[in-house]
Image: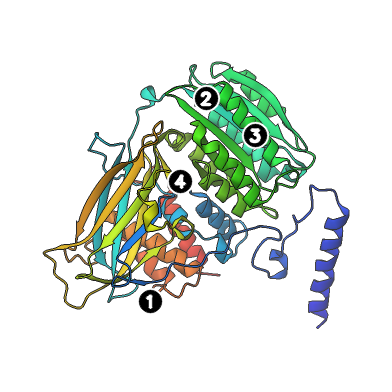
Amino acid sequence: MKHYLSILFLFVCCIISCTEADDTSIQVSTLEDFGGAEFLGDNYDEIIENPFINTADEAVSTFSVDADGAAYANMRRFIQESQQLPPVNSIRTEELINYFNLDYEYTDTTHPINLNGEISTCPWNASNQLVRIGIKGKPIPEAELPASNFVFLIDVSGSMSSEDKLELLKNGFKLFVDELTDQDRVAIVTYAGNAGLVLPSTPGSQKQTIKDAINSLGSGGSTAGAEGIITAYEIAQQHLIEGGNNRIIIGSDGDFNVGPSSTEDLVTLIEEKRDLGIFLTVLGVGRGNLNDAALEQIANNGNGTYEYIDTIEQLRKVFIYDFSKFFTVAKDVKVQVQFNPENVLAYRLIGYENRILDNEDFEDDEEDAGEIGANQNITAIYEIIPQTNQNLNIKALTIDFRYKNPDEDLSIPLSLDVFDEGNTFTQSSDYMQFTASIASFAMLLRDSEYKGTSTYGDIINWLDNTSLADSYNFKAQFRDLVQQASSF
């Protein structure tokens, strides 16, 4: 009893010290020392997993692609740094899957995206099957990348003072500057109590000038996120490059608290800006007051992508290894799957819960959807319940796609027929086995009702059966994460 009273006393003292401190320390204390499961103040949207849908009731499934990778890096931070499983609602399965670079083929140069797909048995439910849908963005050689007009929008409010926030972002932006060409331009806008222009749009040839401006940044004050967003778009518009790459890169913990600050307000603001031909990258940092929900929705609704920065190596991934993803090759990419009722009894889309679209949205060019960067891959997985008597001579499903070129408003259709070739999971491609392993891991982390018979040990065995390129050791690191999670 004395032990629990001591813990309670320490916890109360921690709260009191936070409330008496300035705004840089509010909600930074965590529950991890007291046996809790997540950081105080972190905000995640609730995720309700997609259910199985009977094909007889609805044979068509429609969703927007999602090119984000934030949930993976955030999950890794919980397991590696905090030695605990992440909060259930922080697990967006599609972001775990799409974190990794896969060498999907790009052979049809008539479109900026290429398609692939396959069916195999399901390793966690022997009576079911999996469908993998793959999309590959057009690679662009470095010498052929268009001129860029970048605006760095950096949160310098008081909540950004810790080393894992502003200082980490500053290091990342300086790495990014080294990737710029002389034809590129960079402006820097900051926001705390007010928004301010720290660096006017400056040629990429003046790298030291840009880095000096980054080095000068310090934190303090409240967070006027909306004002910063408005200013950044104004600067981007002033220096818009027709036919070029125009992009705002936001770095923040998402703790907006001055002016329009609710997720709904900020999403409305972003939606008003997304038709300007300016794309968006959102970088989340920190813990204790990470507003993951707001940052993800800002990216989703602003022709953007969302990444979480937890380590220097993650900085290198986002700013160097995946630099080509800052160049959008297809926007408003939608997927619509027509299941054949003769072969498929029911289906379930794994992940993409906040990317589901109404079927009528598929051909509506006013309906926003996700973007794909140069050389980027996107994967989606369905678990299906097959009919008892399948006919392998007919297609199991047809996948229709729609995309827009980055500077156009009319969508272009594509389609892919997928047949069941009777492959077992072990006979399927390495792509299937690797991505399905990630999907299974996400379900275990969520303690999903759909996790079936899979275990962490099973996932490690499936991963060991694959042989995919792993230039930066991220796939090997994922195996280590699975092993580490199994011990909690």
Residue at the outermost right position: 20
Q: Secondary structure at mark 1?
A: loop
Residue at the outermost left position: 393
Query: Can you see residue 188?
Result: yes
Mark found first going from the N terminus, 4 or 2? 2
Disc 3: CA contacts within 10 A as few (<14), some (14-19) or many (>=20): some
* Mark 1 in CB contact with mark 4 (< 8 angstroms): no
Give, as a three-letter code, the residue at label 4. Answer: Asp
Q: Nearer the viewer, mark 4 or mark 2?
A: 4
Mark-to-mark CA distance, 3 and 2: 16 Å
Mark found first going from the N terminus, 3 or 2? 2
Query: Can you see residue 85?
Result: no
Q: Which residue is mark 1?
A: 453
Give, as a three-letter code, the residue at label 3. Answer: Ile
Please, is residue 463 above or below residue 455 in the view? above
Mark found first going from the N terminus, 3 or 1? 3
Mark found first going from the N terminus, 3 or 4? 3
Mark-to-mark CA distance, 3 and 1: 50 Å
Q: Give residue 329's position: percent from left, percent from top.
A: 38, 35
- On residue 368, the disc is 4
Q: Which residue is mark 3?
A: 230
Q: Give residue 194's position: percent from left, percent from top.
A: 76, 34
* Mark 4 in CB contact with mark 2 (< 8 angstroms): no
- Left or right position of 44 against 444: right
Q: Nearer the viewer, mark 3 or mark 2?
A: 3
Q: Nearer the viewer, residue 165 or 404?
A: 404
